[in-house]
Image (tube, grey):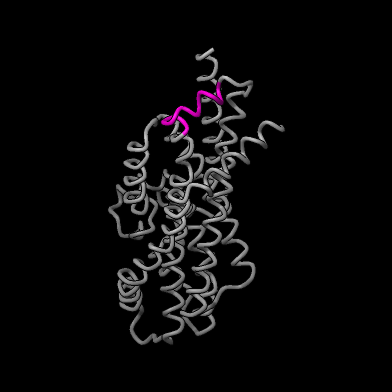
Amino acid sequence: MNILKALIKRNTKLFFKDKGMFFTSLITPAILLVLYATFLGNVYRESFTSALPDGFELADKLIDGTVGGQLISSILAVSCVTVAFCSNMLMVQDKANGSIKDLTVSPVKGSALALSYYISTLISTLIICFAAAGICLIYVAFKGWYMSVSDVLLLFLDIFLLVMFGTALSSIINFFLSSQGQISAVGTVVSSGYGFICGAYMPISQFSQGLQKVISFLPGTYGTSLVRNHAMRGVYAEMLNQGFPEETVEAIKDSVDCNLYFFGNKVEMSSMYLILALTSATLIAVYILMNVRKGKKSV
């Protein structure tokens, strides 16, 4: 246990000491917020207002709150995974500069070494993503605040689970990488592609039926929906208070992926949590097992 603590402390210190890794991870959510607000804000607003039934009018504050909730949920859903890949560069760097050899020749179990990388990356990513969440909540407060304390707390829980998932996924992928160039290439692919397949850039409801069914098997999809539900729950409650029919509100939820369907069956939020938690636990177990088997082969 002492060895594990020492390794976690070592990895975390090295991450924050490396200004390149730290600032790359830190500015990613901030850049996404600027880009989303600049380019996607009007798209989300026009898409939402055009979908309103004839005769229904909403105050600008409620529309802005709706758009703001959709924006920050997209940003946080993507950042929890992409930032994890940036934070997890240390594992690859240790291979590239030979530091991993010094660690493996010492009496350190492969499982402890693997777990130390995972936990240190988890800690670093959580710090950055919670900081990003704070910035996003400030943005929503200026645009139109409808979130309750429970919404914020559940949003933080969603972030924690998504970071666990993103860290486990990046750990498995980075296990096969051994150079800075490889991790940069993988990071670029993940940053550009993950937002589409998880429904952050474009609602899954706008994809073809076949693609929707494929994406419904991906756990990140349910993580995005959880974040979106808690970022926008207050907005939907206010719509109902203003006299919107429940059917209309449900249709809006369908259009922005707050409601997800698996082969026509609605997926409950409790099931979304279960899917995300079980997937994260499975990926962590697979990652540790991969390192243990590698350690046995090198003996």
Q: Quadrant of the C terminus?
A: top right
Q: Position of residue 53 (x, y in %)?
A: 35, 80
**In magenta segment, residue 23:** no
Vertical arrangement, residue 269 with respect to residue 66, above or below: above
Q: Residue furthest top?
A: 299
Quarter assignment of residue 13: top right
Quarter assignment of residue 49: bottom left
Provide the major secondary structure of the magenta segment: helix
Image side of residue 268 versus residue 220, left or right: right
Observer-nearest of 181 and 118? 181
Observer-nearest of 137 and 12? 12
Q: Position of residue 168 (x, y in %)?
A: 51, 39
Identify the residue at image location x=61%, y=73%.
148
Vertical arrangement, residue 97 with respect to residue 215, above or below: above
Observer-nearest of 281 and 239? 281
Image side of residue 36 versus residue 284, left or right: left
Q: Quadrant of the N terminus?
A: top right
Identify the residue at image location x=48%, y=42%.
88
Vertical arrangement, residue 177 with respect to residue 36, above or below: above
Q: Position of residue 23 (x, y in %)?
A: 45, 55
**In magenta segment, residue 102:** yes
Residue 40 appears in the picture as rendered: yes
Q: Which residues are magenta?
A: 94-104
